[in-house]
């Protein structure tokens, strides 16, 4: 399923530590994925971040990018997920 406008959602959750944003953004940059918007917060020691990204110019397919982000998350000690914007929207509506 390909998002019409190329947007996808990246979520990152885990314990806060140095380098999480740089690590995730680095994977996106390496694959020519543009970050359209980003929000992050630290609640006590817990880190949460959500990014809206544009996949139109990505050098890799959606599944490959998911795998690369998940692998980066494992190295960083956080959980990183990539979802198509439509899937994210439908999962979180009431």
Image (tube, grey):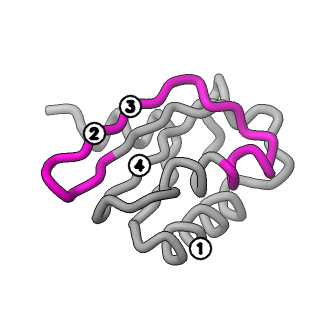
The answer for how far apart the CA atoms under marks 2 and 3 are is 7 Å
Front position among marks 2 and 1: 2
Question: Residue 64: x and y, percent?
Answer: 71, 64
- Identify the residue at horizontal 76%, vertical 54% (top origin): 61
How far apart marks 4 and 3 lie (CA) works out to 10 Å
The answer to which quarter of the image holds residue 39 is top left
Q: Which residue is mark 3?
A: 39
The residue that disc 4 covers is 11
Going from N to C along the chain, the mark reached first, 1 or 4, is 4
State the residue in front, 41 or 58.
41
Q: Earlier in the sequence, mark 3 or mark 1?
A: 3
Q: Does the magenta portion include 56? A: no
Circle nearer the N terminus (2, 1):
2
Secondary structure, mark 2, is strand
**Where is the C terminus found, in terms of image quarters?**
top left
User: Image height check: is 49 above or below 35?
Assistant: below
In the displayed structure, 9 sits above or below 47; it is above
Q: Residue furthest front?
A: 18
Determine the residue positioned at 86% across, 48% down.
59
Residue toward you, 92 or 14: 14
Q: Mark 2 — residue? A: 41
The residue that mark 1 highlights is 71
Q: Provide the secondary structure element on which disc 1 rests.
A: helix
Residue 88 position, x and y percent, is: 38, 40
The correct choice, above or below, for 8 with respect to 65 in the image is: above
Q: What percent of the width, then of the height, locates residue 20?
A: 48, 56
Q: Is residue 41 magenta?
A: yes
Residue range corresponding to the magenta coloring: 26-48
- Compute the Cα span from label 2 to label 4: 12 Å
The number of numbered discs placed on residues in the rendered structure image is 4
Q: From the image, state whether disc 2 or disc 4 is nearer to you.
A: 2
């Amino acid at each position: 399923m390909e998002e019409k406008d190329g947007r996808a959602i990246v979520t990152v959750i885990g314990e806060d530590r140095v380098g999480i944003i740089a690590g995730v953004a680095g994977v996106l940059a390496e694959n020519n994925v543009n970050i359209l918007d980003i929000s992050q917060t630290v609640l006590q020691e817990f880190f949460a971040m959500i990014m809206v990204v544009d996949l139109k110019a990505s050098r890799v397919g959606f599944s490959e990018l998911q795998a690369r982000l998940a692998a980066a998350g494992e190295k960083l000690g956080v959980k990183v997920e990539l979802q198509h914007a439509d899937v994210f929207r439908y999962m979180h509506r009431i």
